[in-house]
Image (cartoon, rainbow, N blue to C red):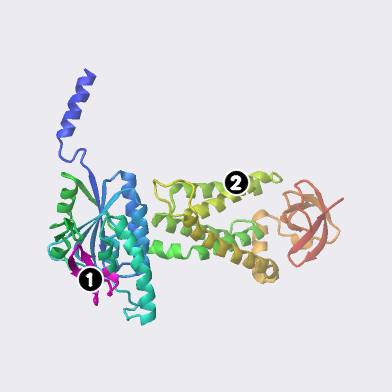
Amino acid sequence: MKNIIRCALALILSWTPGFGAEEVVVVPLRGEVSQAQFFFLRRALKDAEKSGAKLVLIDMDTYGGELKASVNMQDALSKSGVETATFVNKNAGSAGALIAVSTKRIYMAPVSAIGAAAPVMGGGQQMSETMSDKVVSYFSGYFRSAAERNGHNPDIAEAFINKTKEVKIGEEKIHAPGSILTLSAQEAVRVVGGKPLLAVAVAEDVGTVAELEFRGAKVRRIEPSGFEQIAFWLTSLAPILLLAGIAAGYIEIKTPGLGVPGVLAGVCFVLFFAGHYIAGLAGREVIVLFALGVVLVVAELVFLNGFILPGVLGVLLMIGSLFYAMVDRYPQQSWIPSMEEVIRPIVNMGIAGVLGVVVITLLARVLPKTPLYGHLVLAAEENFGSAVKHALHVGDEGVALSTLRPVGRAEFGGVVCDVISEGDFVESGSRVRVVAVNGTESHVERVG
């Protein structure tokens, strides 16, 4: 009886409109091509791949934009495991034309055009002849390769950017040198040599394109959010956020007790992960690993003094999660990143690391001499009920309550104070002696 019911339900669902239909994800690309749009396209490609979509259709209307952004988009499209197509919804000018030939198929609106990809300066000014020749020479080859990879005529793609390029198919001359190639919808679909010149067909709208690709296809449109632009700025500021987080964390360690530096460090790392998560770089797993690393470090400092392994493991998890959050990985790719994918994380981590060492070194020398440090230390001591650090004298002996590496806490005659060890780390429970008192700092050494 159960099997009969299941078969009946399956039959009813199979008759239901849209059930089992192939999904086509529509990604609008409107206005100027920019890095923010690249972030949006990358997120949409990953979303489509995770949902099992059969096609990503770019709904394009642009006169062009940043060449670098179009190169990034071409790279993202080549990495995607989903079939790609472009619907030229009026305009695919300049960088837009180069993105279009990076997809497998191109459709044209009845009144539309594609081409004219001559490079210009960021402000729209013409490049110098020498610079223009260099840019055209390099990117002509680059987009010839992209067009050929996706089954388009590479001579057409080169003629979009190189005005000296002549295009011939068999004996028919399609384009004479001396101007940049631009194709109307009717020219793009014209059959020459047994195949369309560039575009598959003329279509009224994205729905028509989806129907031509997959009959009865389910169309899902992904719209850009305001956070995409925020993500662009946050990811570009990754080294600064890392540096600020490291410096604030160091100050917090030097002044025990959760205060402004600790909160600032937390905010910096939250912004770092938030930007990379919105941009589609980081997943939830790296955020969880970072949080786990923080828990292990705090546990080692507060509860497991002298047991170094949790702290080391925590630091490794934090560094690894920060690094992996910047790796641009697609769902079908291996978890082991390629050399190309780790270049950007290495550069960002390297910049933050070098500057972090410099900043920490300066803070270690300058911070203890500033009034701010004295106030922070006194406030921390009040929170812990030990505001008598200044009462220590050279020769006083006590017991280390935490591992001094080199900063930690020790008890002197019932008074708990923050101290700094001279030389090697001192394990918790060891006897220590005060060897120097410098303002708010008390330096100790291991007895015996």
> Residue drawn 29% across and 55% down?
150
The kind of residue tagged 2 is Leu
Q: Magenta segment, which residues? A: 159-180
In the rendered view, would you say 414 is above or below 37? above
Tell me if I can see residue 260 in this picture. Answer: no
Picture quadrant where residue 118 is located: bottom left
Q: Nearer the viewer, residue 167 or 306?
A: 167
Helix, strand or loop at mark 2: helix
Q: In screen coordinates, is 255 left or right of 444?
A: left
Position of 141 compared to 378: left or right? left
Q: Are marks 1 and 2 in contact (CB under 8 Å)?
A: no
- For disc 1, the marked residue is 181
Q: Residue furthest front?
A: 171
Q: Position of residue 418 (x, y in %)?
A: 72, 57
The answer to if 200 sits in the magenta stretch is no
Res. 323 in view: yes
